[in-house]
Amino acid sequence: MAWEFDSNKPIFIQVVERLQNDIVTGVYKPGDKIPSVRELAMAAGVNPNTMQRALQELEHTGLIYTNRTSGKFVTDNVSDIQRANESAVDKTVKKFVEDMKALDVKGEEILELVKGAIK
């Protein structure tokens, strides 16, 4: 089944975010082999070139690496994965606050809503 994409955001970015999320949440654990570009592209329902570009971006950030004879693997460096997780959390929180402010919800009210949602 193909992944669902938001038409308001480039597919490449969404593929990078999805794979990054799969790494930081443990779908792909440190040292795990990543499926091939073609397998991932087919699963996502995207062009293999788009998937290859996304994997290159993840390799650039250090979340995955290529072993020329065996394929692509998740980094064993847990601190890189933790850093990516913290970055994703920070980005999500900032987007949430921006969205709430766009709805004219003030800071204290945002905090109260979050506290209520946690309970």
Image (cartoon, rainbow, N blue to C red):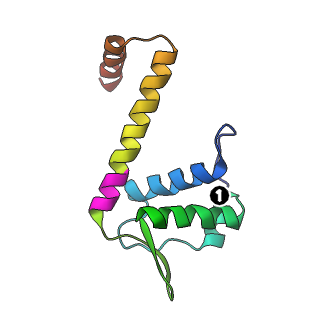
Can you give x and y, in whole percent of width and height, for residue 106 in the image? Answer: 39, 11
Query: For mark 1, what is the residue?
Result: 44
The quadrant of the picture occupied by the N terminus is bottom right
Q: Residue furthest bottom?
A: 69
Is residue 103 at least partly visible in the picture? yes
Rendered residue at 37%/53% (across/down): 84
Answer with the quarter of the image where residue 89 lies: top left
Chief secondary structure of the magenta portion: helix
11 horizontally vs 30: left or right: right
Rendered residue at 42%/24% (across/down): 97
Q: Is residue 94 above or below residue 119?
A: below
Q: Is residue 12 magenta?
A: no
41 horizontally vs 111: left or right: right
Q: Residue furthest front?
A: 60
Q: Is residue 83 magenta?
A: yes
Decide which of 53, 111 is in the foreground and name it: 53
Can you give x and y, in whole percent of width and height, for residue 52 in the image? Answer: 62, 67
Answer with the quarter of the image where residue 105 lies: top left
SS for dot 1: helix
Q: Amino acid at mark 1?
A: Ala
Is residue 42 at least partly visible in the picture? no
Q: How many marks?
A: 1
14 horizontally vs 59: left or right: right
Can you give x and y, in whole percent of width and height, for residue 116 in the image? Answer: 32, 18
